[in-house]
Amino acid sequence: MTTGEIAELLNGKITGNANLEINSIGKIENAKPDQITFISNPLYEKYYGSTNAGAVLVSKDFKINNIRKEVTLIRVSDPYLSFLELIEKFDNENEEIETGISAQTSIADNVRLGDDIFIDDFVKIGKNSIIGENSKIYSNVTIDKNVLIGKNCIIYPNTVIFKNSNIGDNVIIHSGAVIGGDGFGQAKGEDGKYIKIPQKGSVKIDDDVEIGSNTNIDRATIGETIISRGVKIDNQVQIAHNVEIGEDTVIAAQTGIAGSTKIGKNCMIGGKVGIVGHIKICDNVIIGAATNISKSIDTPGIYTGYRGKPHRDDLKIEANLKKFLESN
Amino acid sequence: MTTGEIAELLNGKITGNANLEINSIGKIENAKPDQITFISNPLYEKYYGSTNAGAVLVSKDFKINNIRKEVTLIRVSDPYLSFLELIEKFDNENEEIETGISAQTSIADNVRLGDDIFIDDFVKIGKNSIIGENSKIYSNVTIDKNVLIGKNCIIYPNTVIFKNSNIGDNVIIHSGAVIGGDGFGQAKGEDGKYIKIPQKGSVKIDDDVEIGSNTNIDRATIGETIISRGVKIDNQVQIAHNVEIGEDTVIAAQTGIAGSTKIGKNCMIGGKVGIVGHIKICDNVIIGAATNISKSIDTPGIYTGYRGKPHRDDLKIEANLKKFLESN
Amino acid sequence: MTTGEIAELLNGKITGNANLEINSIGKIENAKPDQITFISNPLYEKYYGSTNAGAVLVSKDFKINNIRKEVTLIRVSDPYLSFLELIEKFDNENEEIETGISAQTSIADNVRLGDDIFIDDFVKIGKNSIIGENSKIYSNVTIDKNVLIGKNCIIYPNTVIFKNSNIGDNVIIHSGAVIGGDGFGQAKGEDGKYIKIPQKGSVKIDDDVEIGSNTNIDRATIGETIISRGVKIDNQVQIAHNVEIGEDTVIAAQTGIAGSTKIGKNCMIGGKVGIVGHIKICDNVIIGAATNISKSIDTPGIYTGYRGKPHRDDLKIEANLKKFLESN
């Protein structure tokens, strides 16, 4: 593919050689002359002077001091999104399409499987479960009974999905995730010993959700734990029983959300965040990494600090503390 | 089941219609007229005025301002515990009892299996292991050699239990848990490279323990890592080698306990707590969520804060800091 | 084995009975007369007076006030390392060597397997993968296509290793670990919905690395996530895409390292540490447990505190705060 063809594909404007043959993509630090790379983050602009890439995707207003003839620029409105598009184009792996059902599986008689499905080795699927067309279930996955999985889903190896879970279309669940395990409910009896609270609800995961490796989403005690459309969850996240997460919210790794808490739409929750149970976080809240939230939040904005506060207050506390401590 | 029959079952006192037919349980916010729900937490009392539930379990001293004829009340001493009892009654799933041994397993010749056992597909059990009557081992579980599992245990899918583990009766282990993996022991050699310290001990889990999904309990270097009777552990908890946890202690999700630490009885450890190695926590200690403990605790009470302190001191620090910062 | 033979083996100097028969190893608190134990940490010297061990490994300058005739001492230069050597000697399990390939596996036709390999039940290995001699792959492991695993590796049950991963010699991967899962990359589109960023890179793990249970190491977006020779990683650690970790660095449990961060050699990172993405940590840095690092570190030393600071500064802040609060 030539730089000219790439510029046309991405609706970009070319500066330099339009006939350069590009064979793959690369990182700006170590790309080769037959590769294309991109500059989106200003921190990476410094590499323009030294990159060996044959071509670079840059923004429309990218400024250059020293013109390098050997580097062809393609100006686009969003270099990063354009680069993502190219990644798919240049994916040379020629992935063959995996379909069919392995002979080494255990699929209950009345399971319903859609067309063009792939079921890998050592998968177990319990009775009454339904899996939509074009979904892929990889090796060593357990799908319990009465589970509904939509179309175009990918369930990676060693995942467990418990009974009555209801999973939409285009959902990706990464390895080692556990969906619909018992919530942690223990009632203290009169003798001081704990009695297990039966967990009789289920998990509902809407369309376009991605769930990271070794992440847990517990079933509700009664009712549903709800992960709404477009939610993206990273690895090692703990979502307790009866939690509800609103559309297009993203949650980074190692965050934990305790039981019955409701989180709004379009929130961004950093890594290692802790959120107590039975509170509400409104829409459009950003929570910084390693922040703990113990009260409901009803104002959009950024919250940070060990005891999560509005970010401005948190910065002020840090500055005041610093001033005080330096004067002592 | 009628409200009258329920009241009799729970030894409760009825106010309203004793002949109302109740078919299932529900949450107070969205229960239907043929459902029963409960009010235990005062925060939920506000729903009394609007619930569509046919019946509500309430405490003996529950006060109502506006009597609603369409809602039958059943007064009991502990509405929550009574509700748990009802959950089991109304569990309409009619779970068939799973027993038998799948043909798609790998069970060593001299494994001993109790009566009424269930072993699901793709389970591997190593030699000399013993599993007690009425226990259930679900799909894709690996049980290593010389493992002892008691009666009435449930081992959920994709769990791994390593050699020489000794597990009591009525133990529940959730999916993805790893019991008896090597402790993390690395000795620095003279050349600066680490030498793996052999982990030759084992894990002992007593009766009535519950262990959450993707939780790890490492084997001892020498001797045993001990989880005592009645301990309840949530998801994604890390218990290092040679840790000992006393009876009826509960540990919430994402907590980590470093090597050789001993924790007493009846402790409550919140989520995301970190406890360093080689210390002792006495009985009846409560540790708040996201608290870090770096020294032994020998006085029962509540401990909170980034650098875990007695809760009263922690609150005072917060208050003083606030006062100071507001005056600056 | 007699105490005399042990002294000879360890190049130690004996005080006491050189003909005592020792049958196994024990912990100093509960060792028996036919066992040998050790004292390395001064905190354990107090047990010398009461141990029932027949023999104790001690350092060359170990001082005793009350000589106990029934306890034979063997003086060595490093009692701990000598004890590790003995652990292996006294390992009475007589582990038979596991080799061979189970019939209940799914191994693609063109997989190449070295000599003396062990492949356990319900293992899946994808096409073009290569596994070196003397490596062991335990039950329910999934190895994707184009994976390269070196010699003498141990891959414990229920681990997943994704395509194109490149793993060196003498690597140990514990149960439930996921190597090469997709990095967490989500680009926000103009409609506010997230677009998954394709993760096309891979994971490279060099020789002598150990990786804990339920730990995740994500594949790079482009290029490689790199774990260098001799790195030791504990359980439940999250290593995001494009992270690089230098030689002989150790990382304790529940730590998370965000995308593209580079960590130097010989670092020691405590448990529950959080490190943001796109920063650099230089060689020889020690980060205390539960510390969060949000900026690059270019000076070796110890860093601690919720907002990671040089340890000296952190201690000063704590002391000043204490002083201030006590005076208020």
Image: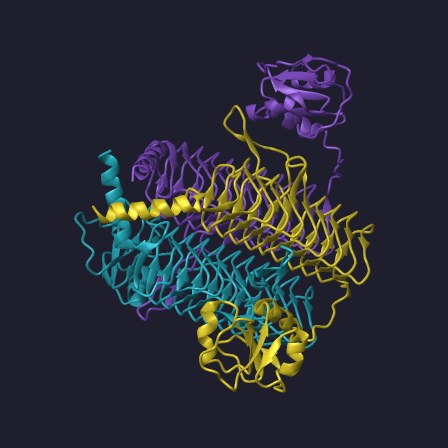
Chain colours: A yellow, B purple, C cyan
Q: Residue at x 38, y 63 (%)?
A: C296
Residue C317's x, y, as percent?
27, 47
Position of B150 with respect to A148 (left or right) is left
Residue C55's x, y, as percent?
29, 54
Q: Which of the pair A59/B220 is nearer the observer?
A: A59
Q: Which of the pair C295/A198 is nearer the observer?
A: C295
Say if B184 sits above or below C219 in the image. Answer: above
Position of C321 with respect to A76 (left or right) is left
Say if A231 sits above or below B12 in the image. Answer: below
Residue A206's x, y, as percent?
69, 49
Where, by quadrant of the figure, is residue A7 drawn? Answer: bottom right
| Residue lying at the far left of the rendered structure | C65
Residue B325's x, y, as percent?
32, 39
Q: Which of the pair A179/A170 is nearer the observer?
A: A170
Q: Residue at x 62, y 85 (%)?
A: A18
Where, by quadrant of the figure, is residue C73 drawn? Answer: bottom left
Position of B217 with respect to B170 (left or right) is left
Say if C193 sits above or below C298 in the image. Answer: above
Where, by quadrant of the figure, is residue A199 drawn? Answer: top right
Q: Check the picture and name the quadrant holding the C terminus of chain B.
A: top left
Q: Residue at x 67, y 52 (%)?
A: B139
Q: Is residue C145 visible?
A: no
Say how many tags the image has.
0
Q: Is residue C207 visible?
A: yes
Q: Which of the pair C300/A126 is nearer the observer?
A: C300
Q: Check the picture and name the quadrant holding the N terminus of chain B.
A: top right
